[in-house]
Image: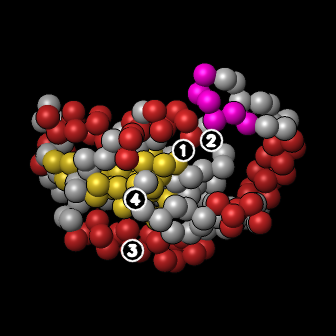
Amino acid sequence: MTASLDATKPVDSYRFLDGMTKRMVKSWVGLGTPADIPWTPLAKPLSDCTVAMVSSGGVALKSDRPFDLDIERRDPWFSDPCYRVIPRETVAEDIQVYHLHINAAFAEQDLNCILPLQRLAELQASGVIGRVAPSHYSYMGYTLRPQRLLDESVPAMISRLKQENVDVVVLVPV
C-alpha cells in the first residue's frame, strides 16, 4: 500500500481503514454521554470583531520545528500534542504540512484549503469582519488520545488568543 503526495495522482485505496473506522466509532460511542455545546453570543457585531483560525491540519512554518510524526507512527492512537503559530501573512510557500491522514500536497499548493487566511483577509477587506488576528494556530488532527493537547496546548492557544484580543475563533477541521 502506498500513498502519493503528488496531487495529480490518485491516492491509493486504504481498504483496511473501513474495519478500523467501524471499530473506532463503536468505541467512541461508548465513551460518554453527549453534553450541551458551550455557546457564547458575540458581544459586538462581527464587523467589529478580531478573528483567528485554528486548524487541525498539522500546518507549520518551514522555519519552525516540524510536528513529530514518529509519535503517531509508533502509537497510532496518539500524535504530537503541540501546536504551531501561523502569522496572518503566511502563504503556501511558507508552510509544510505534517499530517499522516491527508494528502498534504493540496494544502502545500493552496493553503486556503486547510487554513484559509486569504479568504479571511477578503472578509476583512469587504467589512464582514473587523480585523484578521495577527496569529493563527494549527495542531495535529486525528488525535485519538487528546489529553495532553487539551491540558497543555489548548490553554496556551487560548492565552495567546486573549493577549491578541481575539473575539472570534474559526475552527478548521481537517
> Disc 1 to disc 4, how far (Cα)?
22 Å
> Disc 4 to disc 2, how far (Cα)?
22 Å
On residue 102, the disc is 2
Q: Main secondary structure of the magenta part?
A: loop
- First in residue order: circle 1 vs circle 4: 4
Marks 4 and 3: which is nearer the front? 4
Instruction: Identify residue for label 4.
Output: 63
Mark 4 in CB contact with mark 3 (< 8 angstroms): no
Three-letter amino acid code of the residue under disc 1: Val
- Residue at the image position 22 percent from the left and 71 percent from the top: 163
- First in residue order: circle 2 vs circle 3: 2
Mark 2 in CB contact with mark 1 (< 8 angstroms): yes
- First in residue order: circle 4 vs circle 2: 4
Looking at the picture, how far across and down is residue 135, in whole percent? 28, 58
Looking at the rendering, which quadrant does residue 78 occupy? Answer: bottom right
Looking at the picture, how far across and down is residue 75, in whole percent? 76, 66
Mark 2 in CB contact with mark 3 (< 8 angstroms): no
Three-letter amino acid code of the residue under disc 4: Ser
- Residue at the image position 17 percent from the left and 39 percent from the top: 124
Marks 2 and 3: which is nearer the front? 2
Provide the secondary structure element on which disc 3 rests.
helix
Please check the rendered image and state whether residue 113 is part of the magenta-colored stretch, yes or no: no
**Magenta stretch?**
3-8
- First in residue order: circle 2 vs circle 1: 2
